[in-house]
Image (spheres, grey):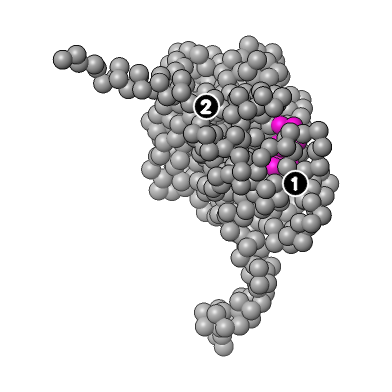
Amino acid sequence: MLLIPRNALSWGRRLHYRLMRRRTVISGAGPISALGVGLDAHWDAMCSGRSGLRPMTTFDPQWYPCHVAGELDAGAFKVRSIVPKSYRKAVKVMCRDVELAIGAAAEAIMHANLQTPGVDHERGYPIKSERLGCHIGSGLIAADVNELTTAFVSSRGDDGEVDLRAWGTTGMENLTPLWLLKYLPNMLACHVTIVHDCRGPSNTITCAESSSALSLGESMRVIERGAADACLTGGAESKLNPLNYYRQFCAGRLAEARGLEPDDVVRPFASDALGTALGEGGGLLVLEDLEHCTQRGGTPLAEVLGYAATQSPDHDGLGATAEDIAAAMTLALDSAGVDPSGVDAIVPFGCGIPAIDAAEAEAIQTVFGDRASDIELVLTVPFTGNCNAGNGTIQLAVATRCLQAQSLPARMNTGTLTGDLKAGPCDARDAALQTMLVLSASQGGQNTAVLLGRTG
């Protein structure tokens, strides 16, 4: 009997899988953040070294250590001007997260040169509704404080405290009938699929900063097995409201940034890192079967070569272990059949939270060894803030443009660096790029790694 080593057999199966699966590419990108709407706005700002972080105006953050955030300028985006006229009544039941997803979807579809009922794009390719899926990462959406306060005030008992019996009989009557429909996490995918008539497989993933990449992974599998030709995939979130901001403060994630200039707050991989600043945004990508994309005349922007996810134990909201992040990277490279020596640049999470940065840095050094100090890093959080469930989409979109442009944007970091990673400040520069690795390490402990490759 011929005995085949187990590692050889597993390698053979992986090779067979890579040869048989449908190849997936990114054919459209719609990032949205404090830098603006669309990939051009993000690329131009990052290449010029212009951060979107500024003093917060969404609410008064005086009780918190961080007064800086990545807010999308009100004049740059109005959801009512994006949704079809027949759907504008639904805007009143859209929370901020849904609005961001709606804007990102329209931008991604236009960028991919597709046509759906939700965009006025006559020259775009009219993709079949039943062949268009949708997978969107979402956060745990916090209700509007004013809406809740009205209900709570009417629920007080004789002692002035909220009485649950009164809440159930009279308090809830002060909430609008469709109140809950604004805040369910699946409402992002719900509204996007209705507006764009996506009748393929759809899902919502709520795993903090890894949500976008986990959604991409699901979209990739859906396309690979032939259940759809294209998917809207990514994530969006805003934690710039009192309840969510308070949760992040309690988790010890916010930077101690009183008295600092906005550009000085987020310091990835630095010995004097202070924590992170929050942003609102994220984005959606069009993930598509390569053959379908080329046959319809689309432009593959980058190919998804490899993908993997792992889990770290998380007991304090700062969960990330170097071992598990390294495992995600190794598995993603393995699924693509790419050696660590074949990675040209990395887009890490790089959020400025010391514990997470330390784990991510150790993981990079574990996987790449002596090469770790030579690999270029692209940092997005100093420009946009941590956009949580949508953060990964911004990272992926920027990596896609890097591969297209064969260049890297400027890097912002005012911290004192530790270790040998290329995380210090520098200007935009040309680079020979064939592959880029995009990482996330989330609150909750989920880790992802996505390997993108150059097309054309």
Magenta span: helix, strand or loop, mainly?
helix
Report if residue 17 is visible in the image. yes
Q: In which quarter of the image is the C terminus?
A: top right
Q: Which residue is drawn at 75% across and 46% down?
A: 118
Looking at the rendered structure, the kind of residue marked 1 is Gly
| Residue with the most extreme bottom position | 158
Disc 2 to disc 1, how far (Cα)? 27 Å
**Residue at screen point 36% across, 22% down:** 13
Which numbered marker is on residue 418?
none
**Tag shown at residue 22:** 2
In primary-sequence order, the first of circles 2 and 1 is 2
Viewer-proximal residue among 259 and 37: 37
Residue at x-position 44% and y-position 38% = 320
Image coordinates for residue 14, horizontal then vertical, percent: 39, 22
Q: Residue furthest left?
A: 1
Q: Residue 118 carries which label?
A: 1
Is 234 left, or right, of 196 in this rendering?
Answer: left
Which region is colored magenta? 104-113
